[in-house]
Structure formats: structure tokens, C-alpha cells
Image (cartoon, rainbow, N blue to C red):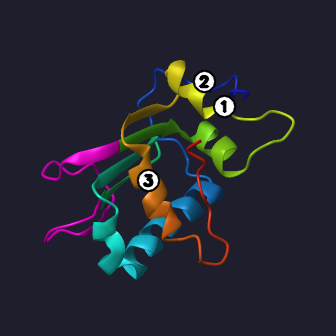
């Protein structure tokens, strides 16, 4: 798992969104829109933060059910994933010569995860039958 040498960890400056990140976010939006009725089966709300790039809150029940492009203040979060874009790219497009170790990344504080990752897995399973679906490996 290699990290770009030129990444500025102390900067609050927005990072340019890469095409694969944009496709991943579009997938999240599309899965939620196409499966509104099934969102309640997820079992809790999900917050995904791609550090300095974008955020998605997936609200799985109630009158606000859907996806929001920010961290909402009124929706309790049952699973939170915070990941730098470079690590997300390793997760979305694994490199067999330099495998990304999610467990090590969490232990090292590179990736933040709180709550039940099974919620994320259930959400992404809604996309499994879709063509060209991206899936972040949580195991």
C-alpha cells in the first residue's frame, strides 16, 4: 500500500476529484435513487467522507430517506467511513503488486471507520446486480 509522497496532510484545501471517485459517487447516488424502497433494509444511516473531496450521507429511513452531498446534522450515523482519495483509488482498483490492506490502513489512522461495516456492505449489495458496479472491499 503506497501513499503519494506529495500529499499534504495538513491542508484543508479541496482536492481535485478524479474520474474514478466521481464514478463511485455517482454509483452511490444511483443505487440509492434506484433502490429507495430497499434502503430501509440497510439497517442504519451511512456517512462516507472522501477527505477534502466529497461527502455522502445515505439516510436509509424516515421522511428524509435518500442521499445528501454533505454530513447531515439531524440524521444519526450508524456507519462512518473516512478515506483519503488515494486510498479510495487503491480500494476501487486494487493493484496486485501493491495490495491495499484496509485493516492496516484503519490501524494506522489512514482510513477511519466507526460503526457496523455490514451496513455499507448491504448498501453496496443493492448495486451488485447492476452493470459496471464498483464495490469497496470491506474485508
**Stretch of the chain drawn in magenta:** 59-79
Q: Which residue is mark 3?
A: 120
- Residue 130 occupies which quadrant of the picture? bottom right
The foreground one among 130 and 20 is: 130
Does the magenta-highlighted stretch encompass residue 118?
no
Can you give x and y, in whole percent of width and height, for residue 103 in the image? 58, 29
Q: Is residue 51 above or below residue 8?
A: below
Which residue bears the numbered disc 1?
101
Give the residue at x 43% y 62%: 123
| Contact between labelled residues 3 and 2, with CB atoms less than 8 Å apart | no
Alpha-carbon neighbours of circle 3 within 10 Å: few (<14), some, or many (≥20)? many
Q: Secondary structure at mark 3?
A: helix
Question: Is 68 left, or right, of 19 in this rendering?
Answer: left
Give above or below for 35 relative to 15: below
The residue carrying pointer 2 sits among few (fewer than 14), some (14 to 19) or many (20 or more) residues within 10 Å by Cα, namely few
Residue sitting at x 54%, y 18%:
108
Q: Residue at x 60, y 33 (%)?
A: 102
Q: CA distance from mark 2 to mark 3?
A: 19 Å
Cα gap from disc 2 to disc 1, whole angstroms = 5 Å
Residue ranking furthest to the right:
97
Q: Residue at x 48, y 55 (%)?
A: 121
Magenta stretch encompasses residue 75: yes
In the depicted view, which residue is nearer to us: 103 or 18? Answer: 103
Locate residue 32: give its quadrant: bottom left
Give the answer, above or below, for where 62 lies relative to 99. Answer: below
Residue 104 numbered mark, or none: 2
Amino acid at each position: 500500500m503506497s501513499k503519494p509522497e506529495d500529499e499534504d496532510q495538513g491542508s484543508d484545501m479541496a482536492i481535485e476529484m478524479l474520474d474514478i471517485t466521481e464514478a463511485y459517487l455517482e454509483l452511490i447516488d444511483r443505487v440509492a435513487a434506484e433502490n429507495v424502497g430497499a434502503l430501509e433494509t440497510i439497517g442504519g444511516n451511512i456517512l462516507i467522507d472522501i477527505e477534502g473531496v466529497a461527502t455522502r450521507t445515505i439516510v436509509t429511513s424516515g421522511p428524509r430517506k435518500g442521499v445528501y452531498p454533505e454530513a447531515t446534522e439531524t440524521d444519526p450515523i450508524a456507519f462512518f467511513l473516512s478515506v483519503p482519495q488515494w486510498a479510495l483509488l487503491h480500494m476501487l482498483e486494487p493493484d496486485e503488486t501493491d495490495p491495499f490492506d484496509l485493516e492496516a490502513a484503519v490501524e494506522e489512522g489512514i482510513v477511519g471507520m466507526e460503526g457496523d461495516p455490514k451496513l455499507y456492505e448491504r448498501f453496496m449489495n443493492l448495486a451488485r446486480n447492476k452493470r459496471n458496479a464498483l464495490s469497496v472491499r470491506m474485508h
